[in-house]
Amino acid sequence: MSYPQYGPEGQPYPAPAGPAYSTPPPARQQLPVTTLVLGVVCLLLLVLAGIGLGLYVNERRRHNATEALLRDRDTTITETESRADDLDARLNNTEDQLSEITGERDALLPCMRRAQEIFDALRRDDDDDLGTALEMGITACAEAEEAVDS
């Protein structure tokens, strides 16, 4: 082992190059156990935060999709109710028209029967039945005309 030599100013002379005079590398310092544990805990927290974020994003996406389906369903229900109301109004109108037409038919039916009796009397060439059928036909058709026109 050699001792360093000092010059006139008190500074050591540089060591001569070579393997005998090289300085050893500094010793590697080991991390304290608490630092290692703290690093592992931080890593675990980071992984858990990533998993939590992934779950949140997935649930949010599913929630948005569900809301879109509900909006579509509500729109479909509204449109269907509107169409049902329109059809109901048309049905009521049709029922009213049917009732009116049925009433007119019922009012015209006696007049038509009397007309048939007139034709039957003409075909048989029976003057007595023809006169009676004409009188009854005129009365029945006048009543039918009043019922239909009112």
Image (cartoon, rainbow, N blue to C red):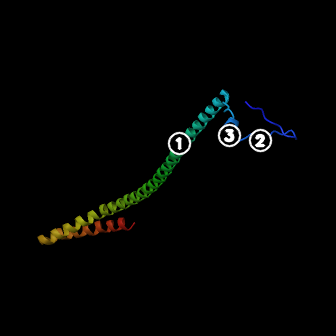
Amino acid type at circle 1 is: Glu
- In-front residue for pair 139/89: 89
Q: Residue at x 41, y 57 (%)?
A: 87
Quadrant in which the C terminus appears: bottom left
Within 10 angstroms of label 1, few (less than 14), some, or many (20 or more) residues?
Answer: few
Distance, label 1 to label 3, CA atoms, is 68 Å
Q: Residue at x 73, y 41 (%)?
A: 16
Check disc 2 and report the residue beneath it: 14
Q: Is residue 97 left or right of residue 128?
A: right
- Disc number lying in front (1 or 3): 3
Within 10 angstroms of label 3, few (less than 14), some, or many (20 or more) residues?
Answer: few
Q: Is residue 58 left or right of residue 93?
A: right
Check disc 1 and report the residue beneath it: 59
On residue 103, the disc is none
> Residue 15, position in %: x, y?
75, 39
Q: Earlier in the sequence, mark 1 or mark 3?
A: 3
Quadrant in which the N terminus appears: top right
Amino acid type at circle 2 is: Pro
Q: Residue at x 80, y 36 (%)?
A: 5
Looking at this view, name the residue that lies furthest to the top.
33
- In the figure, residue 55 lies in which quadrant? top right
- In the figure, residue 4 lies in which quadrant? top right
Check disc 3 and report the residue beneath it: 18
> Residue 146, position in %: x, y?
36, 67
